[in-house]
Image (tube, helix red, strand yellow):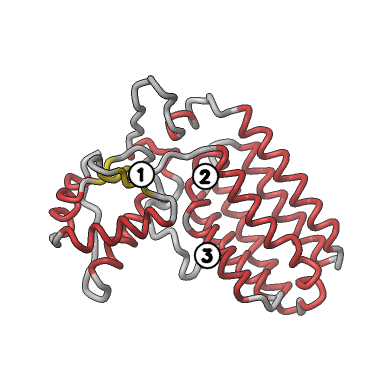
Amino acid sequence: MRLADRRQPVSLNLRTYKAAIYETLTRMICELDLPPGSRLVEAELAARFSVSKTPIREALLILESEGLVRLEPYQGATVSWLSIEEYEELMFLQDALEQPALPRVVERISRGELDAVGRLVERMKRRRRERDSRGFYEASAVMHERLFAVAGLPRLVHVVMSLILHPTRRYERVFMHQFEDIWDIEMGIVTGRFENVAAGDPATAAARVRDGRAAMLGLIRERLDNPQIAPYLAPHVGTRPRRVSGARAAGRGGRGAVLCGVPGASD
């Protein structure tokens, strides 16, 4: 895919060039408009954004630090491939942070906070019924932030959101929301955790997450060769590199490509 040929609107009025370029590329990568394996050529990017190569290079360095882009000497930048190992690591890290915080959440959560989280869970259910991947993701991100902010551990929330807002989104699109059964398990994790937090039972809430994760991972591992997943994984050594068209990437996922970070989600 040649980025210079795309007509992705970019506003540079209120942001630095580097920030605007970074946000636009992040959005396109997370929503699979730039699928894994896509080459990001500095000259093409500079022409597309009408800037010098310096802010392009700086934006690519940030994307590399987040694992979304690979930079190779004399080869340039490419969008990183997905892998089951990275997905497992992301889930492990998220659970390692969130699960021990559940007793604090149960102890501290107010009726008003519980009601607010409950409304977000209901919104996620609606988005699931509508098969709106993007809307589901937005509501999920806000729900996680609201629920675990109750624990009074702002650094924990910051790290969890850094996992959810960028790297996890691509896996949600490819590994989960293309398959009805896996998406239903994800919804069951959310519902089960919330119901047990509301009941004052953090141990069962944690168990629902743990069991649901194991079930999802088992199904995903069985489907790594599925044509809906395989094109997004790194090709084996000696095989011809695969290319995924942005136009067919994971079924387009609902409401189109918008920023992976979620400033706020609404009905």
- CA separation, marks 3 and 1? 32 Å
Residue 255, image x, y percentages: 42, 52
Q: Name the residue: 76% across, 71% down.
A: 105
Q: Nearer the viewer, mark 2 or mark 1?
A: 1
- CA separation, marks 2 and 1? 14 Å
Residue 69, image x, y percentages: 37, 48
Q: Quick one: 187 or 90, which is closer to the camera?
A: 90
Residue 74, quarter of picture: top left
Mark 2: which secondary structure?
helix
For label 1, the residue is 79
Q: Name the residue: 61% across, 37% down.
A: 180
Is disc 3 surrounded by few (<14), some (14 to 19) or many (20+) residues within 10 Å? few
What amino acid type is highlighted by mark number 1? Val
Residue 18, quarter of picture: bottom left
Mark 1: which secondary structure?
strand
For label 2, the residue is 171
Q: Earlier in the sequence, mark 3 or mark 1?
A: 1
Q: Is residue 213 left or right of residue 180?
A: right
State the mark number for residue 267. Answer: 3
* Tag 3 near tag 1, CB within 8 Å: no
12 up-or-down from 248: above or below? below
Is disc 2 surrounded by few (<14), some (14 to 19) or many (20+) residues within 10 Å? many
State the mark number for residue 18. Answer: none
Q: Quick one: 188 or 160, which is closer to the camera?
A: 160
Residue 110, image x, y percentages: 76, 79
What amino acid type is highlighted by mark number 2? Tyr
